[in-house]
Every structure is written in C-alpha cells, then in structure tokens.
C-alpha cells in the first residue's frame, strides 16, 4: 500500500485538498446564506445549483479534455472555482449565488473526474481494490477536515471563503508538478433511464432517493443545526458524525449483503435511515448528545444506500456494462440531489427545522415499501453469483473505472 501511495501521492494529495475545500464551501455557503437572511426556499435553490452544475460537468469535461488536455482543463477549472468562491463573500444575492453554485458544481465535477481518471490510469487489476480503499479513506478524512475548517474564522466574514480559494489553488500544484503520464480522456456518463430501469428498478429508485435525502442533508443540514440554536462547532460535529459513522458502517453492511439477498440489506438500510430520521426529528432538540447520536445513526444507514444500490444493479448487469450502469446511477442520484434541496425547505418552512428529518424519513420509508414490492416481483441473485461489495460514494463516473468490479 505504501508503494501505491508513493506512485500516486501527488494525485491523492491534490484530491484531499480539493475534497476538504469542497466540503468547507458547501457547509459555509449554506450557513452563510442563513446568516444573510435568505429565505429557506431561496437557500434550497442556491444549494441545488451545485448539483445541477455537477451533472453538467460530468457530461462536458471529457470533451474539454479531448480538446486541450488534462492539466490545462484542471488549471482552468480550479481557477474558475477559486474565483467563484471569493465572489460569494462580495455580494449576497440569491440568483448570483445560484449561478456561482452551478459554476462551482461544474468545476468540481471536472476536477474530481480528472483526478479519478488519472488514478484509474495508474491502477492495475492487481491493486485496484487497494487504490480504491486509499482513495475512500482520503475522501472521508478530507470531508471531515473540511467541516472542522469552519471553526477557523467567523462564517459571516470573508476569511473562510478566502481559505476555500486558497485550498483550490493549492490543489493545482501537485497535479501541475506530477510526472505521471496523462491518461486518456475520461468517459462521458450517459443516462439511459429505460436501460437502467430494465437492469434494476430498485437500484434506480434507491439512487434517486439517496439524492433526494442526502442532497437535502448536505445542503440544509447545517441550517437545521443553526436553527436549533447551535454554532459552528456543533455544525461541524453534526456533519462529521454522519460522515464518519457512514464510512464505518458501509463495509459491514456491504459484507452482510454479500451473503444475504442484497435487496434485504438495502431495505434494512432504508428502514434504519427512516427510523433514525424520525428519532432525530423528535429528540434532536433535547441535547447536543441526542443530535450527534442521531446524526451518526442517520449516517450509518443513509450513507450506505448508494453503494448497496450500485452493487445490486451490478449483480444484474454484464461486467462490460459496469461503468456505464454505475455512471448512469450516479446521474440519477444527481437529479435527486437537485430536487432534494428544493423540496425539503418547503416542509421545514411549514413545520419547523426538525421537519427536515421528517422529509428524509418519508423518502426512506417510500424506498422500503418499493423494495418490498420488488422482492415479490423478482427472484434474488444467489450469493454465489453476486459480485463482492465495494464501498461506494457518489463522486464522478470516473471513480467506477478503478473499481475492481469493472475488471471482473
């Protein structure tokens, strides 16, 4: 593993810096919009812009790379993202911030896709599992660090937006100085919903629900904590509790799904997410411990659903179609992530901040019912015929190319 890290160290460092900066920017934008007095529905529109831009970035980056190459596209997107991050602090405006979020989402999609395609180029069939494991560790660790960077300065000031811009700019350095050869352009993710639905309706529904719920959680979750009367430290801890618990639980749930009908584990995860959301809605205001315990419980179940859904779809797909199917599911997730931040503020406005988790609970409960319906409609894939579970988090389609299952 040390040898792999040394070979890909510059790309891992660059991805860690970007992930930390992106995590900080997402949480900061949400709570700063609340500080500026944006209506909750307007905050939802602003936050949804990121996911709309991310979908566009996944679709357009491959052609940009074909035209001018990896490093030029990487530098251009990083410059755009850094400049956009600074503009947030200059003029608080709903429509300006929505446009900036679209630009930031577009840029980050391209940046992540370039790094992930580069890592894939250097991975071999013998070490793909280790490479993906290292990348996932960096992923979750950097996201957690990004949350706690929020404590370095007042979110109502200019400093944290400047820090995001600095991090994005620094991420260029390891890539610009790397001696790793340029890979082929990443593949464009194509969404063929009819084909995806034919492969696995439950996987499509699962990824869409994950988008509806986790998109709302990442976008509006910080405001929930804010409106419950807590400050930056609690926001960082609340979001980090979900991240770390989700990271820790994915592998055990995945291993269980390798020996039991994977749909049953997916339904169990959705049920757990629905129950933990309901408990958090009812008990979150009691104490800090109750909020953090609720966030951890939510993370345990909600963060595992995407990986379980992707694995279930892969059980029914040909190996050659793995990357295309997984990339399509990622775009379904993206569509849900656009809708989630738009829908959840409507419910919170009517019923209060805790209703955020009433919303996620209803979405997860709906997935439970659909999963039970699918179990009686389609036979399960025997455990001996299933591919092994691999931890998955929705980033870009390029990450699926160095997933070991794409080479089976």
Image (spheres, rainbow, N blue to C red):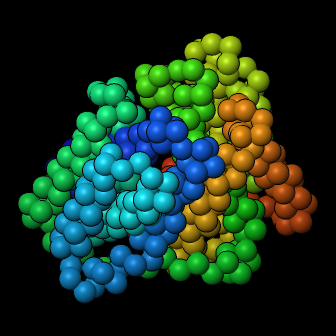
User: Would residue 151 appear left or right of 17 to someone viewing this image?
Assistant: right
- Image check: 48 left or right of 395? right
Residue pictured at 64% horizontal, 34% vertical:
298
Residue at the bottom extreme, as displayed: 67
The vertical placement of 108 against 21, above or below, is below
Front residue (pair 332, 407): 332
Looking at the image, how many numbered discs can be counted on the residues? 0
Front-most of residues 385 and 136? 136
Q: Position of residue 342 (x, y in %)?
A: 64, 55
Q: At 81% across and 55% down in the image, what residue appears?
A: 371
Does residue 308 appear to the left or right of 321 in the view shown?
Answer: right
The residue that appears at 73% across and 74% down in the rendered structure is 197
* Residue 105 visible somewhere in the drawing: no
Q: Position of residue 119 (x, y in %)?
A: 29, 62
Q: Position of residue 43 (x, y in %)?
A: 55, 48
- Which residue is at the front of the view, 219 or 176? 219
Q: Is residue 261 above or below residue 300?
A: below
Percent position of residue 35, x then y: 47, 34
Q: Quadrant of residue 350?
A: top right
């Amino acid at each position: 593993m040390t040898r792999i890290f040394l070979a890909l160290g510059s790309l891992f460092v660059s991805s860690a810096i970007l992930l930390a900066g992106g995590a900080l920017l997402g949480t900061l934008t949400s709570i700063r919009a609340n500080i500026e007095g944006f209506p909750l529905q307007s905050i939802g529109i602003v936050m949804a812009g990121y996911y709309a831009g991310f979908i566009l970035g996944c679709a357009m980056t491959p052609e940009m790379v074909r035209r001018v190459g990896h490093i030029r596209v990487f530098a251009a997107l990083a410059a755009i993202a850094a400049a956009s991050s600074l503009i947030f602090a200059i003029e608080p405006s709903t429509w300006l911030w929505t446009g900036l979020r679209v630009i930031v989402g577009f840029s980050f999609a391209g940046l992540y896709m370039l790094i992930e395609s580069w890592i894939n180029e250097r991975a071999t069939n013998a070490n793909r599992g280790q490479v993906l494991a290292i990348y996932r560790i960096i992923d979750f660790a950097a996201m957690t660090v990004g949350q706690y960077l929020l404590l370095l300065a007042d979110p109502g000031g200019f400093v944290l937006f400047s820090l995001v811009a600095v991090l994005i700019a620094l991420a260029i350095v390891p890539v610009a100085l790397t001696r790793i050869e340029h890979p082929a352009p990443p593949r464009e993710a194509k969404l063929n919903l009819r084909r995806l639905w034919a492969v696995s309706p439950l996987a499509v529904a699962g990824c869409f629900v994950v988008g509806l719920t986790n998109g709302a959680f990442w976008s509006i979750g910080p405001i929930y904590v804010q409106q419950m009367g807590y400050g930056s430290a609690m926001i960082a801890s609340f979001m980090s509790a979900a991240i770390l618990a989700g990271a820790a639980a994915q592998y055990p749930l995945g291993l269980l799904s390798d020996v039991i009908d994977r749909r049953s584990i997916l339904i169990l995860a959705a049920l757990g997410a629905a129950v933990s959301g309901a408990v958090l809605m009812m008990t979150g205001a009691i104490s800090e411990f109750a909020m953090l315990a609720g966030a951890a419980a939510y993370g345990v179940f909600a963060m595992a659903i995407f990986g379980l859904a992707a694995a279930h779809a892969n059980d029914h797909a040909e190996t050659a179609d793995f990357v295309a199917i997984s990339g399509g599911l990622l775009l379904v997730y993206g569509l849900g992530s656009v809708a989630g931040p738009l829908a959840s503020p409507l419910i919170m406005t009517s019923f209060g901040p805790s209703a955020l988790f009433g919303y996620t609970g209803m979405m997860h409960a709906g997935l439970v019912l659909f999963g039970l319906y699918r179990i009686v409609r389609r036979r399960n894939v025997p455990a001996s015929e299933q591919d092994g579970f691999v931890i998955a988090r929705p980033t870009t389609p390029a990450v699926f190319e160095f997933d070991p299952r794409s080479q089976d």
